[in-house]
Image (cartoon, rainbow, N blue to C red):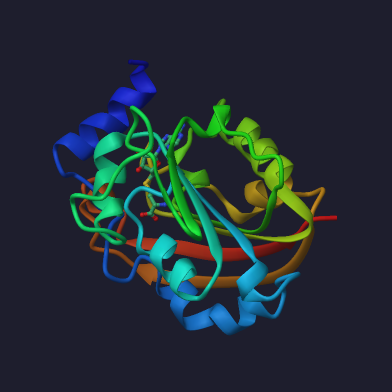
């Protein structure tokens, strides 16, 4: 197992998942109509992608909205936990991995950098995915992968953060809005939201970070 995979495997093995909070997908819930206004197709035809999906409620929210949802996640324990949002424990998995599939939902156990999809996606929902990856050598290839998976006219949502207090060192990695804009400069920015947040997330607090500059960007594929 590579060191990077081990870090995430250890987080899940120790149940140390401070990014899993009741309000994790609050922005999606509260601003969905604003997001929806930019979707290129109606919900029933919308192919949605949740990269680095963990066990996030977002996959279930998008599924409940009627989209056709794909998630990709590296760590088996995370996928087993996510599966509980959809099925009982006895539901079958796909092949030898923890991947599972049912009408309008599939969750694939894979490294995002190896994942391919021939059709592409109308909507990509990135919450705590870009910022989970190291800006030194992972964020640029990740953003290229995301652009390659976005259909022409498709919509990309990215939530990120920075801090003016201290450096966390990551993961998660502070990713200033200017950096995210640079990654996606070949797409068209259609919305930008910014908030100052206080945080009690232990991962931040232990590094002296109690306030975050959080942002959400919406980009359209060309
Ligand atoms: C910070 S968590 C966010 C999970 C989810 N997006 C959420 O909002 O709850 C990042 C997730 O990415 C997964 N991950 C890390 N590197 C990955 C990779 N290269 N490919 C796929 N998943 C990865 C981790 O196991 C972890 O579940």
Task: Please state, as top left, top right, bottom left or bottom right, where the C terminus lies in the image.
Answer: bottom right
Identified at 25% across, 48% down, the residue is 203
* Residue 76 visible in the snapshot: yes
From the top left corner, tell me how far across and down residue 149 is, in percent: 68, 44
**Quadrant of the image for the N terminus?**
top left
User: Is residue 210 shown above or below 43?
Assistant: above
**Residue 103 as seen in the image, left or right of residue 82:** right
Tell me where residue 42 appears, x and y as whole percent.
69, 76
Whole-percent x and y of residue 14?
Answer: 14, 38
Q: Residue 134 location, x and y as percent?
A: 49, 32
In the image, 216 versus 145, the foreground residue is 145
Q: Is residue 173 left or right of residue 142?
A: left
Is 3 drawn above or below residue 51 in the view shown?
above
Residue 76 position by quadrant: top left
Task: Tell whether 89 sits left or right of 129.
Answer: left
- Residue at coordinates 72% horizontally, 74% vertically from top-left? 38
Q: Quadrant of ligand 1?
A: top left
Residue 52, quarter of the rendered image: top left
For the image shown, how many numbered marks are present on the structure?
A: 0
Q: Residue at x 64, y 49 (%)?
A: 180
Q: In the displayed orientation, state which residue is furthest to the right.
A: 222
């Amino acid at each position: 197992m590579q060191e990077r995979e081990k870090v995430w495997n250890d987080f899940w093995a120790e149940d140390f998942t401070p990014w899993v909070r009741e309000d994790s997908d609050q922005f999606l819930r509260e601003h969905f109509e604003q997001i929806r206004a930019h979707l290129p197709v109606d919900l029933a035809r919308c192919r949605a992608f949740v990269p680095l999906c963990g066990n996030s409620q977002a996959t279930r929210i998008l599924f409940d909205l009627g989209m056709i949802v794909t998630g990709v996640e590296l760590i088996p324990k995370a996928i087993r936990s996510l599966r509980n949002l959809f099925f009982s424990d006895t539901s079958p998995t796909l092949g030898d991995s923890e991947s599972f599939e049912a009408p309008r939902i599939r969750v694939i156990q894979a490294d995002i950098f190896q994942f391919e999809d021939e059709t592409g996606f109308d909507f990509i929902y990135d919450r705590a995915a870009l910022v989970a990856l190291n800006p030194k050598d992972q964020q640029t290839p990740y953003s290229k992968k995301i652009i390659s998976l976005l259909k022409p006219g498709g919509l990309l949502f990215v939530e990120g953060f920075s801090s003016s207090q201290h450096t966390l060192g990551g993961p998660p990695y502070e990713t200033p809005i200017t950096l995210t804009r640079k990654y996606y400069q070949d797409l068209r920015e259609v919305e930008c939201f910014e908030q100052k947040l206080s945080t009690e997330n232990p991962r931040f607090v232990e590094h002296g970070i109690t306030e975050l500059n959080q942002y959400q960007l919406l980009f359209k594929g060309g």
